[in-house]
Amino acid sequence: MTDNQHEINVEDGSPDGAQSGTDSLQATDFSTFLTFRLSRLQANLNAQAADLLRRHGGVPLAHWRVLLILFENMATTQKEIVDVAEFDKGQVSRIVERLIDGGYLVSESYNADRRVRKLFLTEAAHQMINRLIPVMRRRHQHLRSPFSEEDFATLFDFLDRLDSVSTKIEDET
Amino acid sequence: MTDNQHEINVEDGSPDGAQSGTDSLQATDFSTFLTFRLSRLQANLNAQAADLLRRHGGVPLAHWRVLLILFENMATTQKEIVDVAEFDKGQVSRIVERLIDGGYLVSESYNADRRVRKLFLTEAAHQMINRLIPVMRRRHQHLRSPFSEEDFATLFDFLDRLDSVSTKIEDET
DNA sequence: GTAATTACCTTGACCTGTCAACGACTAACA
DNA sequence: TGTTAGTCGTTGACAGGTCAAGGTAATTAC
């Protein structure tokens, strides 16, 4: 290619904006970049979920995830939420604050360790969650509809493998 | 701080007696939630890439992606970047601005359509990209190391399937 | 010609995610 | 006690992503 791209004065000449066909890396269709694909997919899935939650009178996606964790009894304190979901503790702190303001959570000081606040869902939260669970379950079924049982298991196996190589790289050069 | 409000004083020992997990989503190991897994994976991969770029004197990840698209001649204008990568046009506008400020891009008005700015990488950008490409290529090989050729193809097939169900859901109800 | 519409890009507002510093508290130990 | 270290949570600062309105240029319709 060597076409040094410092030319000024673009003349056009290529009719209809036809991409000046360079031979650069045709091999690199953008869709072949794994991390790009994952990034785009995740953005779309986030938008899909946030849209569903909004249309059904729910809360923002990150709040929903925190509520679900509490609902499933996977955590009862902020630290446990951070541990189980690997969320940022600062983010969790602010989300919990807003959920309390919104009437979805109450916190109680914990006698055994006064640094800790035990978190409890309110009745309003239970109602909202029970209302949304069928919606989200339908979505989940929609997401897995293109997969057979076996494929779906394979997908999670692949995710496990990707997790194993997604940590910081010690590259030292 | 005036923070104490409802002091209820939990006695330790699971106080709840509530949370009757009726309707729960199931045996909920969090790791079985597809969208959660993807979200976490993507966050880790982002951090991994951003860390590599930082350590090797590069630019932020989103900037890197824009530069790569231009480097690969997959786009020559902002609109083409938006189309090919499905980035937000506002985000691209600001990234391009900063890349120009940083000396990595120059833009030229386009004679045939003065709304359009053709974008060109500077020599500094070429140097930076050529320096980082081996690093990023090693990373990519690292990421695919847990996969055979066939597995990797299957993974992309799965990603295609997920793309097909990741659009907005028309759910009425 | 002028007006309406469309296209490319910019800008502002807002939300989320990430990082680091900090305060409050507990624990360990002299 | 007093010191030190570790843990839970809060806060500030800031980059990144998303959404919508606006500005200017080009296109189409009178």
Image (tube, coloured by chain):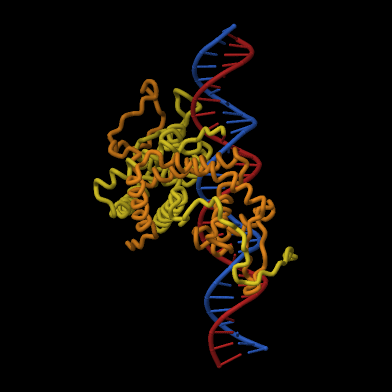
Chain colours: A orange, B yellow, C red, D blue
Percent of width and height locating residue A7: 38, 33
The N terminus of chain A, quarter of image: top left
Res A28 quadrant in image? top left
The C terminus of chain A, quarter of image: bottom left
Q: In this rendered view, identify the residue nearer to me: A119 or B97.
A: A119
Q: In this rendered view, identify the residue nearer to me: C30 or B73.
A: C30
Q: Does B130 sit left or right of D3 as displayed?
A: left
Residue B113 visible here: yes
Q: How many marks?
A: 0
Percent of width and height locating residue D24: 58, 26
Residue lying furthest left: B149
Percent of width and height locating residue A90: 58, 60
Q: Is residue A64 above or below residue D28?
A: below
Residue B60 visible here: no
Residue at left offset 30%, top offset 51%: B144
Q: Does B4 sit left or right of D13 as displayed?
A: right
Percent of width and height locating residue A156: 37, 51
Q: Does A63 sit left or right of A11 as displayed?
A: right
Q: Is residue B88 above or below residue B129?
A: above
Res A146 quadrant in image? top left
Residue at left offset 29%, top offset 46%: B152
Residue at left offset 59%, top offset 38%: A55
